[in-house]
Image (spheres, rainbow, N blue to C red):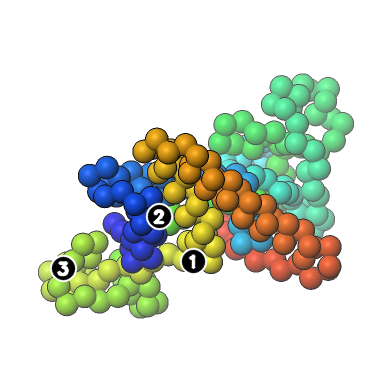
Amino acid sequence: MSTPLYDALVAKVRTWVNRDSNILTDALIEDFIDYSADFCYRKLRIPPLEHTFSYGAVGASAVGETELTVPSDLSEIIQFRKVDAEGNSFVFDERISLLAMQDKDYQHQQESYARKGSNLVFYPAAKLGDVYELYYYRRLKDANAAYVVNQTNIDAGLAESSTQSVTGSVEFPTGSGNYYVGKEVPNWLRDSNERVLLWGAVAHAFDYVGEDERAAKFKDQQLKDIQELNAEEVQRKTRGGSYVQTYSNTAQF
């Protein structure tokens, strides 16, 4: 499903590259936008991408566990910590290699963790009542993501009514003759810094049509804008006025 702001971004990429749909299809441009977003998430380290995920309190069945599954939108870990049943907070200060984590002698020296595929392996093992929290930089929802049509989202105003069935619409409830379309999910890159996404997508498009110099020019521009956004965040921290925007999720351990 495409959404209005996303469709506008696709059209802008086509305008900058000046190629018709016979050469540069919408599907290709959408791939290039995805590639551009991937690069942004690997390079940007700013508050709108910060996120906190809580695993909830450790229950009796999870005592002794040493692994947790990381969130699917994780880009880079900022901090991993736990709060025990008495309210004491511990930060896992050191990320080590999985090989070191499996060394029994090393484990008894300090609290640490390692990545193991889509899991975090940590020491010491979980105790009853421990709450684990992961603070990290995340990847946002796709730039063309829309809210699911259901009664909850309709009531919350996250789905719009339509007089007829259109692309992406859902008849809800089934057989009612009432159609709804999910609104666009907010996306900080697309909504507040579209140019960063745009330059990267344009660079990929020029590369595709064999215009290497133009591709390099727009790639450099994207990297410059990313560096400026990161530098602005450093300045805010230095001045003591850092703006922090975090979003929290809680999962059952």
Badge 1 marks a residue whose secondary structure is helix
Tell me if mark 1 has few (under 14), some (14-19) or many (20+) residues whose alpha carbon lies within 10 angstroms of its own.
few
Name the residue at 72% across, 62% down.
232
Residue sitting nearer the eye, 84 or 202: 202
> Residue flagged by tag 3: what amino acid is it?
Ser
Q: Earlier in the sequence, mark 2 or mark 3?
A: 2
Discs 3/1, front: 1
**Nearest to viewer (mark 1 / mark 2):** 2
- Residue 176 is at least partly visible in this image: no
Which label is found at residue 250? Answer: none
Residue 167 place in picture, x, y as percent = 21, 62
Give the class, few, some or many, for how many residues have Cα within 10 Å of label 3's Cα (few <14, many ≥20): some
**Residue depicted at 64% across the width and 37% down the height:** 120
Question: In whole angstroms, how far apart are the C-alphas of marks 2 and 3?
Answer: 33 Å
For residue 81, above or below residue 4: above
Q: Quadrant of the N terminus?
A: bottom left
Residue assigned mark 1:
191
Residue underneath mark 3: 165
Is 138 placed left or right of 93 in the picture?
left
x then y, percent, for residue 133: 68, 52
**Label 3 element class:** loop
Q: Residue at x 28, y 46 (%)?
A: 25
Please tell me which of labels 1 and 2 falls first in the chain: 2
Question: Which badge, 3 or 1, is on the more N-terminal residue?
Answer: 3
> Mark 2 or mark 3, which is nearer to you?
2
Crowd tier of the residue under label 2, counting other residues whose Cα lies within 10 Å: few below 14, some 14–19, many 20 or above:
some
Which numbered dot is residue 16? 2
Identity of the residue furthest to the right in this view: 109
Q: Amino acid at mark 2?
A: Trp
Indicate the amino acid at tag 1. Asp
Q: Who's the residue at 54% across and 55% down the image?
A: 196
Kindly report the distance in space between the C-alpha atoms of the residues bearing marks 1 and 2.
19 Å
